[in-house]
Image (cartoon, helix red, strand yellow):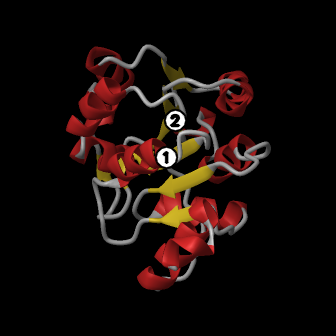
């Protein structure tokens, strides 16, 4: 499939988040964070700065602590490859409210757009299935994306999706870099001000 036939990364996330309600969103390093901020900043977004490889596990922790809230992780293929073991841990825990969405342009975007392992045949969907995800899907087309959008917030259950996107450059949309501020506003959004009492 040609790069020009792939989904637009930023538009894909905007579409997926249309009906998010009070869902928590954890973003991976770099472009996934820019996408989430561009889609609309909210205290329910937790932008992960400088913690490459940790987005999926952070999402797991939030999902376990907030079992009534949908938790979505939007992270890159490079970060997911760095933290493959997290898929096994998440599949064993089986939180009913967690979705791991990997935005895959088959390149390492944060280090210079070198070709990534998924361009050489590494199949993240197969890895997720092998780890124990009962629902793991590949998203390549607009129809696939619409199906994922409908599924994401209309039903529970642990979900993994690999969303294949174009490498076309997208201007950065950079949220606050203030870690303590982001942590505090996210905690307040999740549990209210009593968390600091």
Q: Residue furthest front?
A: 197
Can you identify the residue that label 1 sits on? 73
The residue tagged 2 is 99
Residue 57 versus residue 145 in the image, above or below: below
Q: Is residue 173 visible?
A: no
Q: CA distance from mark 1 to mark 2?
A: 6 Å
Residue at 70% x, 22% y: name it: 147
Q: Is residue 33 left or right of residue 4?
A: left
Q: Picture coordinates of residue 34 (x, y %)?
A: 56, 66
**Which element type, helix, strand or loop, lies under badge 2?**
strand
Are the two marked residues, 1 and 2, in contact with CB atoms closer than 8 angstroms? Answer: yes
Residue at 42%, 57% in the rendered image: 28
Secondary structure beneath dot 1 equals strand
Q: Is residue 124 left or right of residue 12?
A: left
Q: Pick whichever, 146 or 41, lies toward us.
A: 41
The front one of 150 and 124 is: 150
- 36 in relation to 67, above or below: below
As displayed, is residue 67 above or below residue 9?
above
Which quadrant of the view contains residue 152? top right
Query: Whole-percent x and y of residue 158?
Result: 49, 26
Decide which of tag 1 and tag 2 comes sooner along the chain.
1
């Amino acid at each position: 499939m040609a790069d020009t036939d792939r989904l637009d990364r930023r538009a894909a996330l905007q579409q997926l988040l249309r009906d998010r309600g009070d869902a928590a969103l954890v973003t991976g390093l770099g472009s996934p964070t820019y996408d989430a901020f561009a889609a609309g900043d909210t205290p329910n977004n937790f932008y992960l700065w400088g913690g490459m490889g940790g987005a999926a596990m952070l999402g797991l922790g939030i999902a376990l602590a907030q079992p009534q809230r949908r938790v979505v992780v939007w992270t890159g293929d490079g970060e997911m490859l760095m933290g493959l073991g997290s898929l096994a841990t998440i599949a064993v825990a089986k939180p009913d409210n967690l979705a791991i969405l990997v935005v895959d342009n088959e390149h390492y975007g944060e280090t210079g757009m070198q070709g990534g392992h998924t361009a050489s045949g590494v199949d993240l969907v197969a890895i997720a299935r092998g780890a124990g995800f009962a629902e793991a899907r590949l998203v390549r087309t607009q129809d696939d994306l619409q199906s994922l959008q409908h599924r994401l917030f209309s039903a529970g259950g642990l979900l993994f999706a690999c969303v294949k996107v174009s490498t076309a450059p997208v201007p950065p949309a950079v949220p606050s870099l203030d870690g303590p501020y982001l942590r505090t506003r996210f905690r307040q959004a999740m549990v209210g001000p009593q968390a600091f009492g």
